[in-house]
Image (cartoon, rainbow, N blue to C red):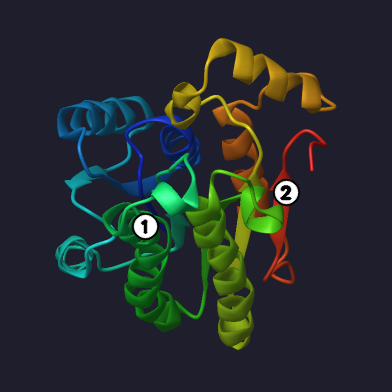
Amino acid sequence: MSKYALVTGASRGIGRAIAEMLASDGYHLYLTCIHSGEILSAFAAELAGRYSVSCTPFVGDMGNFDDVSALFASIEQLDVLVNNAGISYVGLLSEMSLTDWRKIMSTNLDSVFYTSKLSVPLMLRRHSGKIVNISSVWGNVGASMEVAYSASKGAVNSFTKALAKELAPSNIQVNAVACGVIDTDMNHCFSPEEMDALRQEIPCDRIGMTAEVAQMVKSVLGAPAYLTGQVITLDGGWT
């Protein structure tokens, strides 16, 4: 039977790697981004040609319920939801604007609620489904200068555990992958010296790769249905 997956924030980085992994496994895809429409469309066409799957790009803000509703208007079946869309903010909490706080929460947390709210009824029809939320180690332990980001990811972790309990009787699994330092554009705000200092803190002595996150997501999707409500840390032994 055909399998369908939605990946948010799929134009680059972790989302892009996850999308390619799913396409290679035969999933028909819905991919979203908020800014890079041309890049996402080219990527979707590339995946469709390479793996012979349908691949629908969608440009919209997953932190806006109207945009998410417009996306789901064309989705009739969904087996996998990967909530990857996210942004960061580095700076003192006292200097953070209300607009920046709301944007972090909207993109990182509200989006997970919106997509899950509309995905669950589709999964309930088939009495099966898997939701994977891409989180962060800062959601587990918090980070100085990243209070809003840490708070949003901590909330995603709690959301994951609670929704998993709610949906377990319906054979829908909800898990999260809490990433450490991964080689993505999100870390380009740090200088080479700062990145080198981070690397030295990591027992594996290197930065994680987006392909490794995709591999972890694949493992979660292939795990027994008894695996649910888990926040799995992928950080090279860092935290």
Residue at which label 2 appears? 233
Q: SS of the residue at dot 1?
A: helix
Could you say where residue 84 lies in the image, as x and y percent from the top left? 44, 49
**Residue at x-position 28% and y-position 28%:** 43
Location of the C terminus (image quadrant): top right
Q: Are marks 1 and 2 in contact (CB under 8 Å)?
A: no
Q: Is residue 132 visible?
A: no
The amino acid pointed to by label 2 is Thr
Question: As displayed, is residue 7 above or below residue 73?
Answer: above
**Residue at x-position 43% and y-position 75%:** 123
Q: SS of the residue at dot 2?
A: strand
Q: Residue furthest top?
A: 192
Left/right placement of residue 162 relative to residue 235 reads left
Q: Between residues 29 and 145, which one lies in front from this camera angle? A: 145
Residue at which label 1 appears? 101
Could you say where residue 196 lies in the image, as x and y percent from the top left? 67, 15
**Other residues around mark 1 within 10 Å, as few (<14) / some (14–19) / many (≥20):** some
What is the C-alpha distance between the residues marked 1 and 2?
25 Å
**Other residues around mark 2 within 10 Å, as few (<14) / some (14–19) / many (≥20):** some
